[in-house]
Image (cartoon, helix red, strand yellow):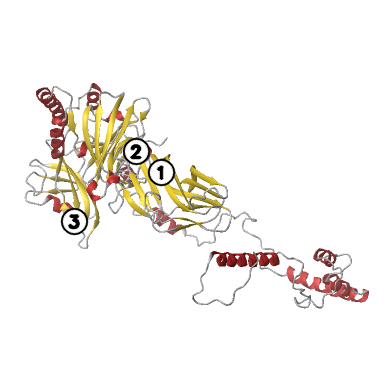
Amino acid sequence: MAYEEKTDWLPDDPINEDDVNRWEKGIKDAHTDLAAHKNDMNNPHNTTKAQIGLGSVDDVQQASKIEFNNHDNDSTRHITSTERTNWNAKETTAGAQKKADAAEKNAKAYTDQHRNDTNNPHSVTKDQIGLGKVTNDKQATKSEFDAHINDQIRHISDSERTKWNGAQLFKITDDNGQGKIYVKETDDFHEIIPKYPGLVHFTSNVAAINGPGTAVRGIWTCNSTGTFGQVIAFDNANKTYRKTVSNGVWSGWEVLETTSGAQAKVDAHTKNTSIHVTQTDKDKWNGSQLTKITNDYGGIAFSVNAGEDMLQAIVNRGRGMGTFYAIGTAVNSPSEASTRGFYQMTSQDADGKGMYGWVYAMDYKNNVFTNYYDGNKVGWQGWNKLDTENAAQMRIEKAVSDAKDYTDSNFSNEKLTVLPIASGIEDARTPGTEYPFGITLMKIYDDNQTGYPLGYGLIKNEKWNNARFTQYFYGNADSRNGKNYLTGTWIRHWWLESGWTPWEKISGFAHANIGTTGRQTLKKAEQNKILYNRVIIDSHGAFDISNNRFIAPNDGMYLIGGGAYVETIATYTNLELQVFRNGSFYKSVQQFRNSDGQNTDSRDLTISCGGVTVPLKKGDYVELYIYCGYSGDVTRYIGDKNGQYNYFDIAEIGGKVY
């Protein structure tokens, strides 16, 4: 039907299907004519050369730019400016003779002048006359030299040299009292200590190799080959660390426990029936450092007498490091017995008093104490008494004995232990051999990201032996607060040969039922994302209505179902419902295709899928698309229907991704 314009429209004239088709046909014909005109390359507008600014150009063959450049660069046919100048400047015979006579006269005059020049006209050097090592300096007289030789103040004697060579030649600290050595994050304690034998004060980076895992200050002493020595270090939390090397073999870092801390651990250990001392443990403890690190006499920097404040005396001395002696009746002394020790203070205030530092003291009863000072906060944190190995061993042996007695008295069946927070295993990567035997419960908190299914929850371990056991994780958030995504139960197994199996979810699965609102236009011959935007049910708040997609809250296998009500007409129609995963076509789930006139009983169609499994990692997303192909120009739509027709159903059916 050719387009015929209608120009006599009245305000109340009805518009029917033929009018719309006639308009569409007119638009299509206009686009067809425009496309044909755009593709006409035979000058359809009869444009002339004058109209494009080339009216003076003749229609003859032109020399190419390459041909012109070749001719312009031909140095055989053309002469240069230099050649032209040289040829114009050629000399005549008379002119040349005149110039030669003048040159001879000038040469004789220069020779006479050169002969009479006594100011080194040939630039003779001191090296050429054998005095290359002589400097142009004023020389001392013989009397001045003799006077310098006899000057006993500027020169040292043999006895002075011997005394100075026997003095301390390596500084324990820098001049400002800071650590002599700084162990950087790229430095290895085992390699850098042998480079600086003797007694050395140091500071270290938190990430130093073979360090205690925290920033520390301390001292080390080792022999010249680095095969024997010890390290003592303190961190800002008032913890003390020790490390030794014997015959070139380094021990691990050991934390020296305080009396109160040791007692608390002993009390906890007494009730912990899953810990037993082995012969290997005894051999390790008996092989620890049992001898003194230094001699009894090491000299002192100052003394603190009765009635004087020992800690204030250290602060008053300002920045630096030193040794001291304090009698037992000194104020703030850590012991009733006299003590000896050393301290180090860094930075100082306007009055010259120390601002930060530590003190390490030992009394004659062999008790060891530490204290830390923070001038900006709490001042001195208080004395900590460090337990000896023998005393700790005695407490451990007593705790083991008490634990056995407690177990024998209170348990005759399987053990059930709730591990305290300090003893819980917070790193999911820890091997199963590190877990205690029996049934134990642990709390996971502080948004743990080491490999547990969620950042918060409860762990139950069922361990019979080190070869294999089972571990459960319970996400136990309060679902009444809309935190279903933090609920559920997972399980994994430990195998000595292969390690941990992946977590598998066994309860608390996510599910959602989503519908649509309004009417959606379907673009012809394109994959159209269905705009599901009405949340009916969403257990884990996982459906994003702004992007019409379901985002997996956990790793798992998901069952996808969907439906769409399509408004169409009785012509050729091809509809295909498709699942997209992470923005890409994943599976075709349903297709409907008919020939012209097949759907005469109904203008509309319903296309749906019963269920498709889709594996998703946490954070992956799925969407439903519909491909719409048809003959003719009548636009198809997804109808404004309820959830009986337009629906997007998602159900998590398993905790593994296959």
Could you classify mark 2 by the number of other residues whose Cα lies within 10 Å: few (under 14), some (14-19), or many (20 or more)? some
Residue 404 showing in the rendered view: yes
Q: Which structural element holds mark 2?
A: loop
Give the amino acid at mark 1.
Gly
What count of labels does the image hold?
A: 3
Label 3 or label 1, whichever comes before in sequence order: 3
User: Which is more foreground, mark 1 or mark 2?
Assistant: 1
Give the amino acid at mark 2.
Asn
Task: Provide residue 440's location: percent of width, then percent of height.
Answer: 21, 31
* Residue designated by label 3: 377
| Residue, far right | 93
Q: Is residue 257 above or below residue 585?
A: above
* Residue designated by label 1: 561
Q: Which mark is residue 474?
A: none
Could you classify mark 1 by the number of other residues whose Cα lies within 10 Å: few (under 14), some (14-19), or many (20 or more)? many
Label 3 or label 2, whichever comes before in sequence order: 2
Q: Which structural element holds mark 3?
A: loop
User: Which is more foreground, mark 3 or mark 1?
Assistant: 1
Quarter of the image with the C terminus in it: top left
* Residue designated by label 2: 210
Could you classify mark 3 by the number of other residues whose Cα lies within 10 Å: few (under 14), some (14-19), or many (20 or more)? few
Q: Which structural element holds mark 1?
A: strand
Frontmost residue, 424 versus 488? 488
Task: Provide residue 412's location: percent of width, then percent of height.
Answer: 13, 22
Label 1 or label 2, whichever comes before in sequence order: 2
Quarter of the image with the N terminus in it: bottom right
Between the residue at mark 1 and the residue at mark 2, the CA separation in whole angstroms equals 56 Å
Task: Provide residue 8's location: percent of width, then percent of height.
Answer: 57, 77
Between the residue at mark 3 and the residue at mark 1, the CA separation in whole angstroms equals 63 Å
